[in-house]
Amino acid sequence: MVANAVVMTALAIICSVQLGYPLRDPDGFLGPAWVRLPALILLAFVADVVPRSLWRSRHQLSRARAEAVAAIREHWTRERIVLVVLGLVTFYATYVSYRNLKNFLPFVRPHTYDYTLHALDRWLLFGNDPAVVLHTIFGTGIAAQVFSLVYLLFLPMVPVAPAVWLAWSHRTSFGYWFVTADCLAWSLGTASYYLIPTLGPNFAFEWLYTGLSRTGVTQLQDALFYGRQNIRYDPFADGVQSVAGFASLHVAITLVMALVAHHTVRHRLITGHRISLWVFYHGGRRREPRSRRAEVRGLSRAAGRLPSASVGGAWSHLSQQSTGDAWRPANCPNLGHLKNYIHVIRQGDTP
């Protein structure tokens, strides 16, 4: 957890120095970091002690103070305090570094691979476009509004989830488990952005999403587009750009929350919390406009179950459909070691 935060911070600083681009606080509108971080710790403390003391005192205010002192002595041990402070600091360092590294992406890796991954998407769905398939199955009316709401719930859950597990987890090990997994997800997501940089279908293939009903996600995508343009072309622009399509951290972070909750939440009264996280995870996957989750799953299944000649033929078919030169040479006999695919990833498919 700590090592991950140190590495991410070091990478952000190195990129900032090499590019001559300053590090920025992505959420500076909430106040400076030296104010916001202690506020998060205080909020986590209050959110734990107040409900616990009110529950124990049966909402009798005369007993609430005594129960609060007892709750602090029982739950807020030295180990808990170390967990909360260390967990929030490492999470914040990792997340801020992630946002800055994502901001540097267009300058470090200007080439993108949207057409390559889009061709792979279509092959996985037997020649159909994922956007068209999902719009046909779920519709573009009420379902779009519901999925949009689920998708946008991710934004407040990013800072809230670590605070919840750090402050409320019955065992301190559960808090360390969640924050470590959470920080690793942000770090691996950053690595995937630089390994296979993409804009995402919403920006690379806009015609697939024109004419759809406007939702909260539509407004978010507009803000992301203009934010990226400002950072790229306006040297005096503030803020950070947040456009990167592969891999989907909406999927990764909600999966982390669902898995940790599934294995750590046991109380009968809040078992529904685990179920709601799984529903949120699957709902977010369907609404995620820049998710490339199917590629890894589909590629692993293909490599494990199909003969090498069949896999090679499929990739040959993809190469013939691709409009970029990066897919040549096309007719590879097999993909046993995926050498041709790695060659494609290194070259890029955009000028």
Image: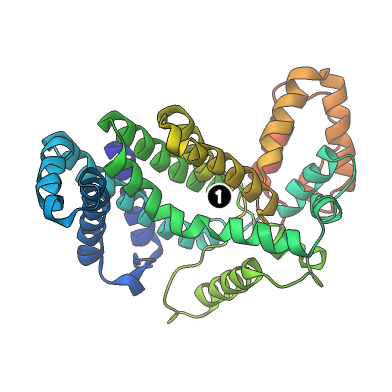
Q: Residue placed at 24% from the left, 47% from the top?
A: 58
Q: Is residue 303 above or below residue 88?
A: above
Q: Amino acid at mark 1?
A: His
Q: Which residue is mark 1?
A: 250
* Residue 7 in sight here: no
Residue 167 quadrant: top left
Look at the image and tell me in which quarter the C terminus lies. Answer: bottom right
Q: Residue placed at 63% from the left, 66% from the top?
A: 217
* Residue 57 in sight here: yes
Residue 24 quadrant: bottom left
Towards the viewer: 149 or 63: 63
Sort mark 1 into few (<14), some (14-19) or many (20+) by Cα contacts within 10 Å. Answer: many
Towards the viewer: 307 or 186: 186
Q: Is residue 240 left or right of residue 144?
A: left
Look at the image and tell me in which quarter the N terminus lies. Answer: top left
- Residue 280 x/y as whole percent: 58, 47
